């Protein structure tokens, strides 16, 4: 994977994947790049030097989509395993897993205030999740583990 400047100069060459990258996102502050792959993992990269910060594993099938909260503290990942996972970007630890989404998740995005998450899947169309990341257990999700 290559990171280019706007004028076309190669800034970084990020290495670490042997299979297709399915999603790539800059963090809102521009300090991180997150990449998702069919190898069931997400990688967090430091933009300034191209180093791998965290390799996030936990999905049982390919990761199809990723999205940062507005403050870049949490990265959400959606997968072909029908789960949404929330990751702490500072320490790389899994925060929570949502399992109430039927079928593969094709796209996710946080609202601008970080309190809602939209998910899209082939079997359900668009689903709106009302999130309180500090108290997910009290929300109306089918099952949280």
Image: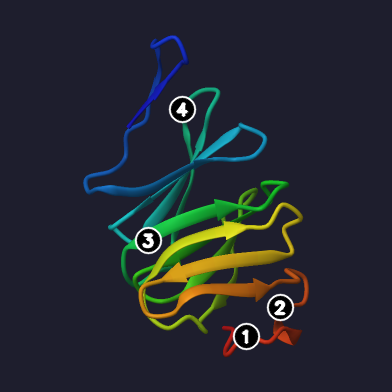
Mark 2 in CB contact with mark 4 (< 8 angstroms): no
Please name the residue shown 61% across and 32% down the image.
Answer: 31
Between label 4 and label 1, give the one nearer the viewer.
1
Q: Is residue 60 left or right of residue 65?
A: left
Q: Please say if 31 is above or below 145.
A: above
What residue sits right under mark 3 in the picture? 63
The numbered dot on residue 141 is 1
Circle 4 Cα neighbour tier, 10 Å, few/some/many (<14 / 14–19 / ≥20): some
What residue sits right under mark 2 in the picture? 136
Point out residue 84 in the picture as x, y percentages from the top left corner. Answer: 51, 70
Point out residue 34 in the picture as x, y percentages from the top left corner. Answer: 48, 44
What residue sits right under mark 4 in the picture? 50
Circle 3 Cα neighbour tier, 10 Å, few/some/many (<14 / 14–19 / ≥20): many
Element class at badge 2: helix
N-terminal of the pair, mark 2 or mark 4, is 4
Mark 1 in CB contact with mark 3 (< 8 angstroms): no
Between the C-alphas of marks 1 and 3, the distance is: 21 Å
């Amino acid at each position: 994977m290559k990171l280019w400047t706007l004028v076309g100069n190669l800034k970084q060459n990020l290495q670490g994947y042997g299979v297709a990258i399915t999603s790539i996102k800059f963090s809102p502050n521009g300090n991180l790049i997150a990449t998702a792959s069919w190898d069931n993992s997400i990688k967090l990269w430091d933009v300034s030097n191209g180093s791998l910060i965290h390799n996030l594993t936990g999905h049982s099938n390919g990761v199809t989509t990723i999205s940062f909260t507005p403050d870049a503290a949490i990265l959400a990942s959606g997968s072909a395993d029908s789960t949404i996972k929330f990751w702490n970007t500072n320490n790389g630890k899994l925060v929570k897993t949502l399992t109430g989404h039927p079928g593969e998740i094709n796209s996710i995005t946080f609202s601008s205030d970080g309190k809602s998450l939209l998910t899209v899947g082939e079997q359900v169309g668009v689903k709106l999740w009302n999130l309180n990341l500090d108290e997910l257990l009290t929300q109306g999700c089918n099952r949280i583990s």
